[in-house]
């Protein structure tokens, strides 16, 4: 790797409130319903957070620290695979900006400080669009999408 970093920015509009969007990201039982993972933390700056697979094995897949929290409008966390938790260079940063936008919410997710060309960067490019689509579906209809679905063979 060259040491270069990359970032991704995703914007979606959700027929919801900032409070409900923030809760869907930070409450484990809600995140499990659209993400298939629980986000577990006390959400105080400096605290640790874990992204735990919401199935029988409860694997901790991602870890990080809470950098900033300003409910219901902003959350900033660091992000790394559990196997790279002790390597500061492997940590990237995710910012959730939640803004009222007329009768809806504009959610902007910025994921930066990713190592360009890394497995994490490639996974992020594929993962966030389906997770955010599932979040939108969940908040608008009560039902998330299958974030683990695979493309159908041609």
Image (spheres, helix red, strand yellow):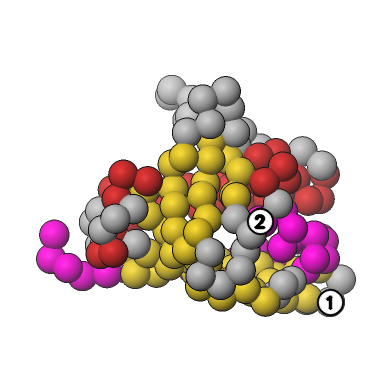
Q: Position of residue 85 (x, y in %)?
A: 34, 53
Residue drawn at x 78%, y 51% is 139
Residue drawn at x 62%, y 73% is 69
- Depth order, front residue of 111/42: 42
Disc marking residue 88: none
Q: 89 above or below 137?
A: below
Point out the frontmost of discs 1 and 2.
2
* Magenta span: 1-26
Q: Could you tell whether 35 is left or right of 102 in the image?
A: left
Q: Secondary structure at mark 1?
A: loop
In the rendered image, the quadrant that contains the N terminus is bottom left
- Depth order, front residue of 13/65: 65
Residue drawn at x 61%, y 68% is 44
- Depth order, front residue of 31/150: 31
Q: Could you tell whether 112 is left or right of 132 in the image?
A: left
Q: Could you tell whether 51 is left or right of 104 in the image?
A: left
Whether residue 117 can be seen here: yes
Q: Position of residue 110 (x, y in %)?
A: 49, 69
Q: Could you tell whether 115 is left or right of 57 in the image?
A: left
In the rendered image, the quadrant that contains the C terminus is top left
Disc marking residue 102: 1
- Name the quadrant containing residue 107: bottom right
- Name the quadrant containing residue 88: bottom left
Magenta highlight on residue 50: no
Q: Position of residue 41 (x, y in %)?
A: 60, 55
- Depth order, front residue of 140/72: 72
Disc marking residue 25: 2
């Amino acid at each position: 790797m060259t040491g270069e970093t990359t970032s991704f920015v995703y914007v979606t509009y959700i027929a919801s409130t900032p409070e409900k969007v923030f809760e869907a990201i930070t409450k484990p039982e809600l995140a499990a319903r659209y993400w298939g993972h629980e986000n577990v933390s006390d959400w105080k700056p400096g605290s640790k957070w874990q992204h735990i697979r919401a199935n029988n094995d409860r694997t901790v897949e991602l870890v990080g620290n809470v950098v900033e929290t300003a409910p219901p409008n902003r959350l900033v966390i660091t992000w790394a695979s559990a196997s790279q938790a002790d390597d500061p260079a492997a940590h990237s940063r995710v910012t959730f900006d939640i803004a009222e936008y007329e009768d809806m919410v504009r959610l902007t997710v910025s994921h930066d400080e990713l190592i360009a060309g890394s497995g994490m960067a490639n996974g992020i490019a594929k993962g966030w669009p389906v997770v955010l689509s599932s979040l939108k579906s969940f908040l608008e209809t009560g039902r998330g999408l299958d974030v683990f679905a695979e493309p159908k063979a041609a």
